[in-house]
């Protein structure tokens, strides 16, 4: 990597972030109920801003159309962050339109799931393929935003995925050079440091951007490596996607809109458990909760990468994840509402 780039990026992030704070730009003023877990208000939501700025160095010339769509998905998140586009249903409609247009124009379709009936539909019905691929990307983008509630949780999760893809030499198959891979790893690592110490938050703009970018990369990788089981890709993305689907089911059962924010996501319950069980301060509890979740995911994803061609093995891992998640969620949920009931007495 060019040493000028290597040293200039953290300096630029620091001074630009300081400028945003000084001028009260992109700050987390809202303090909404589901955001109070973050512990502090008025932290700049600039993670997505830095991602879109520095991604231009590796994408603008080589893949301008992809970069433009990343800009568009970033803008939807940015307008959400600054409360211009505050209604979740409207954001969902805009996301769906944008992602469907991208899938259609870029011809980025999921080609195989190894489910015979579904694969026949994907092969024989082009518009079904567009719909299915778009739906998967929308689930991933919003799932990424759902899990963005702890410092460094989303950034570290995608850094783990990127590092595994680089280690397995899968990025070169989609013309992603070593420089691009190392550059993106370095950028995510820097943002993790700033995020860890409450200097910036990723924001909806950053969460949407990362979910969309990695969804595209993983679809391309699978289509170029048909021998790899599609369930390896599903395993890599299991956490944000399952968090989204689980939240939708949970909210339907409670008679709530599936797109409405709340404070009952897994990471929020884990934060509440550690804070109340062990009396940890907000800063430590926030980061420790994130480390626990990402350590678990690192072990599972690394284990899955040992046999990325074995569909049965990978499906078993996914099912184990779902069972562990559900069991842990119910235990954490009961703990929280047991404490709340006892406090009311």
Image: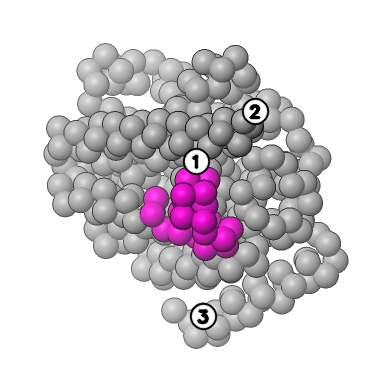
Find disc 2 in the rendering and name its residue.
Answer: 260
Which residue matches tag 3?
A: 6
Residue found at x 66% / y 45%: 35
Q: Are dots 2 and 1 in contact, CB under 8 Å?
A: no
Label 3: how many residues lie within 10 Å, few (<14), some (14-19) or many (20+)?
A: few
The residue that appears at 65% across and 72% down in the rendered structure is 13
Q: Tell me the residue that label 1 is attached to.
A: 269
Could you tell me residue 61's position as x and y percent? 56, 61
- For marks 2 and 1, the one nearer the N-term is 2
Determine whether, in the image, residue 202 is placed left or right of residue 168.
right
Chief secondary structure of the magenta portion: helix
Q: What element carries label 1?
A: helix
Q: Indicate which disc, 3 or 1, sits on the residue closer to the N terminus.
A: 3
Task: State the image quarter where residue 168 is shown.
Answer: bottom left
Assess whether residue 73 is covered by the magenta stretch: no
Quick check: is 279 in the magenta stretch? yes
Disc nearest the viewer among 3 and 1 = 1
The alpha-carbon separation of the residues under discs 3 and 1 comes to 38 Å
Crowdedness near tag 2: few (<14), some (14–19) or many (≥20) residues, C-alpha within 10 Å: few
Residue 9: give x, y in percent of width and height: 59, 76
Count residues near mark 1 (Cα–Cα under 10 Å), then give few for <14, some for 14-19, many for 20+: many
How far separated are the C-alphas under marks 2 and 1?
17 Å
Question: Looking at the picture, does residue 181 appear above or below residue 286?
Answer: below
Q: Give the range drawn in magenta.
A: 271-293
Which residue is drawn at the image coordinates 74% and 47% (left, top)? 31
Horizontal side, residue 110 vs residue 195: left or right = left
């Amino acid at each position: 990597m060019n040493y000028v780039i290597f040293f200039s990026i953290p300096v630029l992030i620091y001074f630009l972030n300081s400028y945003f704070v000084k001028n009260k730009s992109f700050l987390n003023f809202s303090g909404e109920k589901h955001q109070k877990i973050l512990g502090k208000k008025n932290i700049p939501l600039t993670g997505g801003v830095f991602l879109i700025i520095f991604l231009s160095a590796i994408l603008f010339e080589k893949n301008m159309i992809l970069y433009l769509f990343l800009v568009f998905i970033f803008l939807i998140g940015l307008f959400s962050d600054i409360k211009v586009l505050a209604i979740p249903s409207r954001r969902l409609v805009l996301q769906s339109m944008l992602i469907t247009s991208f899938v259609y124009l870029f011809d980025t379709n999921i080609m195989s799931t190894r489910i015979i009936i579904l694969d026949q539909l994907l092969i024989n019905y082009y518009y079904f393929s567009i719909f299915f691929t778009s739906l998967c990307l929308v689930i991933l983008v919003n799932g990424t935003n759902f899990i963005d509630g702890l410092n460094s949780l989303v950034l570290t999760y995608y850094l783990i995925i990127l590092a595994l893809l680089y280690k397995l030499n899968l990025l070169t198959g989609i013309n992603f050079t070593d420089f691009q891979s190392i550059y993106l790893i370095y950028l995510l690592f820097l943002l993790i440091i700033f995020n860890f110490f409450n200097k910036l938050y990723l924001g909806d703009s950053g969460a949407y951007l990362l979910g969309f970018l990695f969804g595209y990369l993983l679809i391309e990788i699978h289509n170029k490596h048909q021998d790899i089981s599609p369930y390896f890709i599903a395993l890599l993305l299991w956490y944000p996607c399952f968090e989204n689907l689980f939240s939708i089911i949970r909210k339907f059962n409670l008679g709530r809109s599936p797109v409405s924010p709340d404070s009952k996501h897994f990471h929020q319950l884990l934060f509440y458990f550690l804070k109340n069980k062990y009396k940890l301060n907000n800063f430590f509890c926030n980061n420790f909760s994130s480390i626990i979740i990402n350590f678990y995911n690192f072990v599972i994803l690394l284990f899955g990468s040992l046999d990325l061609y074995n569909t049965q093995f990978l499906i078993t891992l996914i099912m184990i994840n779902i069972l562990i998640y559900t069991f842990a969620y119910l235990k954490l949920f009961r703990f929280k509402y047991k404490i709340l009931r006892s406090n009311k007495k």
